[in-house]
Amino acid sequence: MIISPSVLSMHYEDFRKELADLNESVEWIHFDVMDGHFVPNLTFGPVLLEAFRRNSDRFLDVHLMVSDPDYFADVFAKAGADSIVFHYEAYNDLEKCEKLINKIHDMGLKAGISIKPKTTVEEIIPLLDKIDIFLLMSVEPGFGGQKFMIEALDRVEQLKRYKDEHDLNYIIEVDGGVNDSNAHDLVSRGTDALVAGSFVFKGDIKDNVRKLRECE
């Protein structure tokens, strides 16, 4: 199981200490990019990702919640991302999504698709054999600290079943309201990577990561 804490919830006054804790305890670091348009919130630019890259050898997992993912994919690839995940809803067009997936791969990065809770898995099935990561939102994207939507468990099962039936290798990643009370159910249904922000950064980071691992 991969733990990918969302640094949207990080305490930046303690950046060096908290990043050191992440470097010691997790495989991935999740970086939420919001443009104030695709979602109402506005978050990080590439300069901050560069700071993480200079101070960490962890896998930097960039989640683009933006209206122009093609532009931002270039920007964050240059800043040091290891993966670029973008939203199907930015295009609602399978051909445009496939084109960007290919571009991300050509830059030497892992490519992923994310969907909002109201978008069905069926809409993006033609893309599943082309991606490395499927990021399933279990809250409405745009803000941290939301309550986990229980319906996500059935969607994880659906993705896992399709993955196994078609011998695919994409990582099933879940983002939104993840904590030690739902992590076991997520992993048992087929989740490979857990994105957790508020839970990890509220209190002792390494201890909270350990609690998630105990749910495996």
Image (spheres, rainbow, N blue to C red):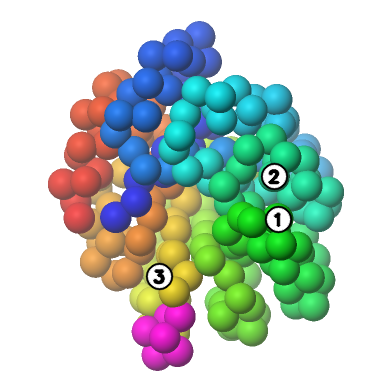
Badge 2 or badge 1: first in the primary sequence: 2
Judged from the image, the secondary structure of the residue bearing numbered disc 2 is helix
Closer to viewer: mark 3 or mark 2:
2
Looking at the rendered structure, which numbered label has been put on residue 156? 3
Q: Where is residue 62 in the image (x, y as percent from the top left)?
A: 60, 45
Judged from the image, the secondary structure of the residue bearing numbered disc 3 is helix
Q: How far apart are marks 3 and 2 (CA)?
A: 28 Å
3 and 2 marks in contact (CB < 8 Å): no
- Amino acid type, mark 1: Met
Question: Residue at 37% of width from left, 84% of height from top?
Answer: 164
Looking at the image, residue 125 sits to the left or right of residue 205; the answer is right
Which segment is the magenta one? 163-168
Q: Mark 2 points at which residue?
A: 77
Q: Position of residue 27 (x, y in %)?
A: 37, 43
| Label 1: how many Cα within 10 Å (few below 14, some 14–19, many 20+) | some
Looking at the image, residue 155 sits to the left or right of residue 179; the answer is right
Q: Toward which corner of the image does residue 115 lie, by quadrant?
A: bottom right
2 and 1 marks in contact (CB < 8 Å): yes
Looking at the image, residue 41 sits to the left or right of residue 157; the answer is right
Q: Where is residue 79 in the image (x, y as percent from the top left)?
A: 69, 35
Looking at the rendered structure, which numbered label has been put on residue 107? 1
Looking at the image, residue 106 sits to the left or right of residue 163; the answer is right
Q: Position of residue 194 (x, y in %)?
A: 38, 51
Q: Distance between the residues labelled 3 and 1?
A: 29 Å
